[in-house]
Image (tube, rainbow, N blue to C red):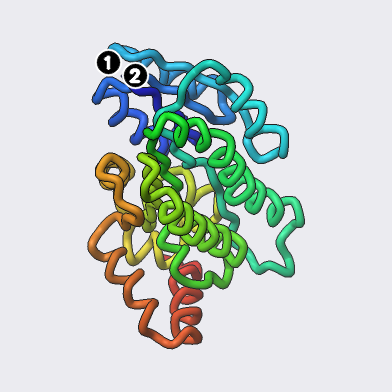
Amino acid sequence: MSTALITGASGGIGYELAKFFARDHHNLVLVARSADKLAQVATELQVHGGTVKTIALDLAPPPGPKFLFDQLAGTPIDILVNNAGFGTFGEFAQMPEEEILGQIQLNVTALTQLTRLFLPLMVQRRSGRIMNVASTAAFQPGPGMAVYYATKAYVLSFSEAIANELRHSGVTVTCFCPGATHTGFAKRAGTEKSRLFKQLGAMDADKVALDGYRALMEGRTVAISGVHNWLVAQSTRFAPRRLVTAVSRWVAEKVDS
């Protein structure tokens, strides 16, 4: 029975992914900041027969990823899901420095460090799967969420590159790119009243997670959840960059209804 480590597992896409892994009888290591929420999830998922280990930990501070790795010494991690991340809405010049650096630390640095820590053991075993959760934000600049969009562009580029490096290793790397999804993300980011969520619509987290789970198990390098999101992501390759940026800003703007 393989073991899957999922960060950001107490809610949203991470929680829904955990359910799919549990149903397919994987052992789980679930990481999030809230010990109470993790305990509730563990109780729910243990009925499927696998073990569920929880670690309440904020991965944004620099010691976090190495602390997690050390806590799991002796536990082979077969699947790593780097799902933890957050975004904040607001113009860059007015955004608090801790919000800017916090996004970079969690979305980029922690993800990169966790991948670097767990990957060599997978390569040694010539077996393993890694999912790095990015976003359709990875495909264009994002005025109003400049740092968040930039961090997700990093995740996409990084994942594609190491997937190619590992093509003969027995280890697969999947970059999963969901679009707007009904989770706690929008409330945390301050985008609940944006055109994206109010008028264009968001997908349900369980459907998004199923797309990601299938892509991971199939070993796909890049996966975009939803046909509409796929079309939008592809369109950015051909439209003028100034237009792509302007549309991205329009979508992020807040509306009354």
Task: Return the mark for residue 48.
Answer: 1
The percent coordinates of residue 240 (x first, y second) are 43, 87
Quadrant of residue 125 in the image? top left
Label 1 is placed on what type of residue? Answer: His
| Tag 2 and tag 1, C-beta contact below 8 Å | yes
Of 184 and 10, nearer the camera is 10
The residue at 41%/67% (across/down) is: 195
The percent coordinates of residue 113 (x first, y second) are 61, 41
Of 108 and 253, nearer the camera is 108
Of 145 and 176, nearer the camera is 176
Q: In the displayed orientation, state which residue is furthest to the right.
A: 97
Quadrant of residue 127 in the image? top left
Query: In the rendered image, which quarter contains the C terminus?
Result: bottom left
Q: Secondary structure at mark 1?
A: helix
Query: In the rendered image, which quarter contains the N terminus?
Result: top left
**Vertical placement of 43 versus 86: above or below?**
above
Horizontal side, residue 130 vs residue 204: left or right: right
The residue at 43%/19% (across/down) is: 40
Quadrant of residue 69 in the image? top right
Residue 230 seen anywhere in this rendered image of the structure = yes
| Numbered marks: total | 2
The residue at 31%/28% (across/down) is: 21
The percent coordinates of residue 133 (x first, y second) are 44, 48
**Vertical placement of 149 versus 118: above or below?**
below
The percent coordinates of residue 251 (x first, y second) are 44, 71
Label 2 is placed on what type of residue? Answer: Leu
Q: Secondary structure at mark 2?
A: helix
For the residues marked 2 and 1, what is the alpha-carbon distance in whole angstroms?
A: 6 Å
Residue corresponding to mark 2: 45
Task: Return the mark for residue 60.
Answer: none
